[in-house]
Amino acid sequence: MPTYSYLCDNCKKDFELFFYIKDYIEHPKCIYCKNKKTYRQYIKDVITQNTSVKKSDNELKTIGDLAKRNSDKMSEDYKQHLYNKHNQYKEHTIEKPLPSGMSRMKRTKGKTKWY
C-alpha cells in the first residue's frame, strides 16, 4: 500500500497517510487540526520511494533486483564484511613454486604495452 506525504497549510505539520491508489484523496483532512488545506509533498514521496516500495518474489525480474532487495536488509558492517571476504584474494597472492629452470616475470606498474 503506497505512503503519501502531506503538509498542512494551517498548522504547518507533516503527516503521512497509507491507502490504496484507488482511494487516493488530493486534499485529505489534517490528522492534527482536521483542516482540509493540505498539500501533497511529492519530493518526500520520491525520496522515500526506493526504501518504501519492496518487490515481492514474483516481481523480481533480474538477479540485480534480488541483490538490491537483499542488500537493503544488510547493515553497513555486514556489507563491509562481505566486501572484505570477497576481495581478500586481491591482497594475498599465494605464489606456487615453479618448475626448475623457470622464473617469474615482474609486474610493471601501469598499462602493459602490446606490440
Image: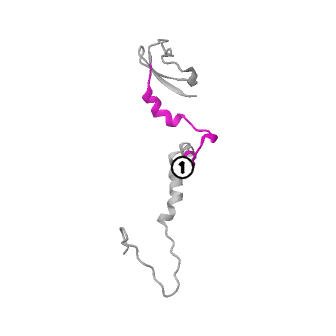
The residue under label 1 is 78
On the rendered image, what quadrant is the C terminus found in?
bottom left
The residue located at (53%, 34%) in the rendering is 52
**Where residue 79 sits: x, y (%)?**
52, 50
Residue 51 belongs to the span the image colors magenta: yes
Span colored in magenta? 39-65
Look at the image and name its color scheme.
Answer: one colour
Circle 1 SS class:
helix
86 versus 115 height, above or below: above
On the rendered image, what quadrant is the N terminus found in?
top right
Q: How many marks?
A: 1
28 versus 114 height, above or below: above
Of 104 and 20, the residue lying toward us? 20
107 versus 64 height, above or below: below
**Where residue 30 sits: x, y (%)?**
49, 15
The residue located at (48%, 33%) in the rendering is 48
**Where residue 95 sits: x, y (%)?**
50, 75
Residue at the front extreme of this rendering: 115
Specify the amino acid type for callout 1: Tyr
Residue 8, quarter of the rendered image:
top left
Secondary structure that dominates the magenta span: helix
The residue located at (51%, 55%) in the rendering is 83
